[in-house]
Image (tube, rainbow, N blue to C red):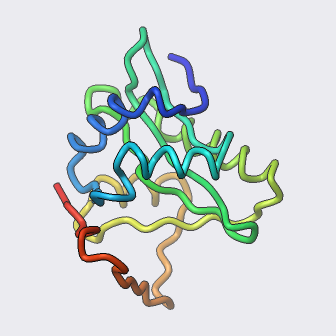
Amino acid sequence: MEIRCMTIADYDQVHMLWTHTPGMGLNQLDDSREGIEKYLKRNQGTCFVAEENGRIIGGILSGHDGRRGFIYHTAVLEAYRKQGIGKKLVEEAMNALEKEGIHKVALVAFKQNQAGNDFWEEIGFEERRDLVYRNKVIHESQAINTL
């Protein structure tokens, strides 16, 4: 298994991984090929895939705004879970963000995504109960699809 930087050439396999991961929320615009290509260009060297024999088995999007790091769409194929792949992807992302001068990372997980929340808790991400996450859609076509 190899962990390497994600490229837009990985999109089809990564998108398939996301759509087959229960609890993952996807958005028609931001998670389209064009949306992910834009994200990868803006966040070069901070997004990763885990690959085995030419097949993508895991992926993570991470980036920053110059002040805080953010993690999105972390997933590992079910058959490959509990082998440390997700943790390695997070470590790669955290190391890449640290090299860019970022010292704190945040993420959002759906409350009903128990497997995802258990994973984040297990690797040391704490739930913030003192915050209220707010969201406003700019374009109605960006409706969130959850699986």
Measuring 47% from the left and 54% from the top, which residue is drawn there? 122
Looking at the image, residue 129 sits to the left or right of residue 103; the answer is: left
Looking at the image, residue 51 sits to the left or right of residue 114; the answer is: right
Measuring 44% from the left and 15% from the top, which residue is drawn there? 52
Nearer-the-camera pick, 4 or 139: 139
Q: Quadrant of residue 69?
A: bottom right
Measuring 30% from the left and 43% from the top, which residue is drawn there? 18
For residue 81, say whether it is visible. Answer: no
Q: Residue furthest left?
A: 147
Looking at the image, residue 58 sits to the left or right of residue 107; the answer is: left
Measuring 68% from the left and 67% from the top, which residue is drawn there? 65
Nearer-the-camera pick, 138 or 23: 138
For residue 24, say whether it is visible. Answer: yes
Tell me the quarter of the image containing the C terminus. Answer: bottom left
Q: Position of residue 23 (x, y in %)?
A: 24, 56
Q: Position of residue 81 (x, y in %)?
A: 35, 33
Q: Position of residue 78 (x, y in %)?
A: 26, 33
